[in-house]
Image (cartoon, grey):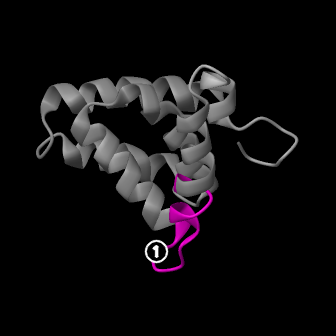
Amino acid sequence: MSDSKELTVAQKKLGNFAPKLVQLTDDVLFGDVWKREELSPRDRSLITVSSLITGGNTEQLKSHLNLAKQNGLSEEELIEVITHLAFYAGWAKAMSAMTVAKEVFLKEK
């Protein structure tokens, strides 16, 4: 697992239940792939949020919407992404994603 003192999101969610998956998430996905310079963190967040919406993966969407905001995307831009994807990913997926976004964004206010 990661060497940092504070637990990562993966460590908090899966801890010792799935240590290899946590280690791969922390070290490979976020420690390597997300650090590559060919795409900015903002672009990676935009791609990831779009992919999660398209796949209907709202469980992971919560944390990635927050990460997207940290990486420079505004709430308005993220709402527009969801609206745009309604026509490509499907209405039900967009409505589910918008419900998650509303919950995430209103919780912060």
Relative side of 47 to 40, left or right: left
Q: Position of residue 86 (x, y in %)?
A: 17, 39
- Residue 78 drawn above or below residue 31: above
Q: Position of residue 33 (x, y in %)?
A: 50, 63
The picture quadrant where one finds residue 8 is top right
- In the picture of the structure, the residue carrying the numbered disc 1 is 39
Foreground pick, 69 / 38: 38
Residue farthest to the top, as pictured: 17
- Residue 37 drawn above or below residue 50: below
- Residue 10 painted magenta: no
Q: Position of residue 101 (x, y in %)?
A: 45, 31
Identified at 11% across, 44% down, the residue is: 87
Classify mark 1: helix, strand or loop.
loop
Q: Position of residue 37 (x, y in %)?
A: 54, 79
Residues in magenta?
29-41
- Residue 53 drawn above or below residue 93: below
Identified at 60% across, 19% down, the residue is: 17
Quarter of the image for the N terminus: give it: top right
Foreground pick, 3 / 72: 3
Quarter of the image for the C terminus: give it: top right
- Residue 37 painted magenta: yes
Residue farthest to the right, as pictured: 5
Identified at 31% across, 49% down, the residue is: 50
Identified at 61% across, 43% down, the residue is: 23
